Amino acid sequence: MGDSDQEETLEELPESATVEVDDGAYSPLHSHIGTDGTVTWENTGDTSHRIDAFQFHAGSTGWTFSTELEPGESATHTFEAEGLYDFTDQAHGQFAMCGRIRVGHVEEGSSLPCE
């Protein structure tokens, strides 16, 4: 048997994910994509929502992202490095609207305050 038969293969991760921004919650709360993958946030609600990068736990990755979405609008971000990327809607509070993007083969980490 060759070495390639003994090597563990990593799960292939999706290149993209969509997060629906509804009035009061993100769906899904957790998304998992591969490195250099993109996430699109779509405002499916009736009010405007602000999506802000946030760091809920020490194990989360610090990042910069902030956008305001009117009903029907969307925004996309490409994640170039592995990590746990948290986000929230500050207008609704981190305990009401929050989410996480897991990029690459990293552990999920601690739960979110909105769970």
Image (cartoon, helix red, strand yellow):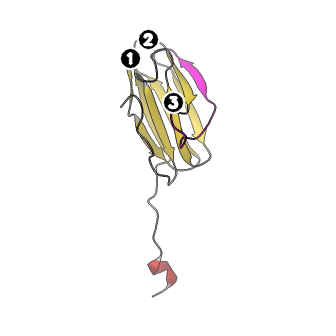
Q: How dense is the environment of label 1, judged by Cα within 10 Å: few (below 14), some, or many (20 and up)?
A: some
Q: Are marks 2 and 1 in contact (CB under 8 Å)?
A: yes
The percent position of residue 75, horizontal first and vertical second, equals 55, 27
Mark 2–mark 3 Cα distance, whole angstroms, equals 18 Å
Q: Is residue 73 left or right of residue 81?
A: left
Could you say whether the residue bearing mark 1 is in a helix, strand or loop?
Answer: loop
Mark 1–mark 3 Cα distance, whole angstroms, equals 16 Å
The percent position of residue 89, horizontal first and vertical second, equals 49, 21
Sooner in the amino-acid sequence: mark 1 or mark 3? 1
What amino acid is labelled 1 in the image?
Asp
Q: Is residue 26 left or right of residue 90?
A: left
What amino acid is labelled 2 in the image?
Thr
Q: Quadrant of the C terminus?
A: top left
Q: Quadrant of the N terminus?
A: bottom left
Q: Which mark is residue 43?
A: none
The residue where tag 1 is placed is: 23
In magenta stretch: residue 44: no
Q: Is residue 48 left or right of residue 53?
A: left
Which quadrant holds residue 112? Answer: top left
Report the magenta residues as a range. Answer: 56-71
Q: Which mark is residue 87?
A: 3
Mark 2–mark 1 Cα distance, whole angstroms, equals 7 Å
Q: Which mark is residue 47?
A: 2
In magenta stretch: residue 65: yes
84 in relation to 68, above or below: below
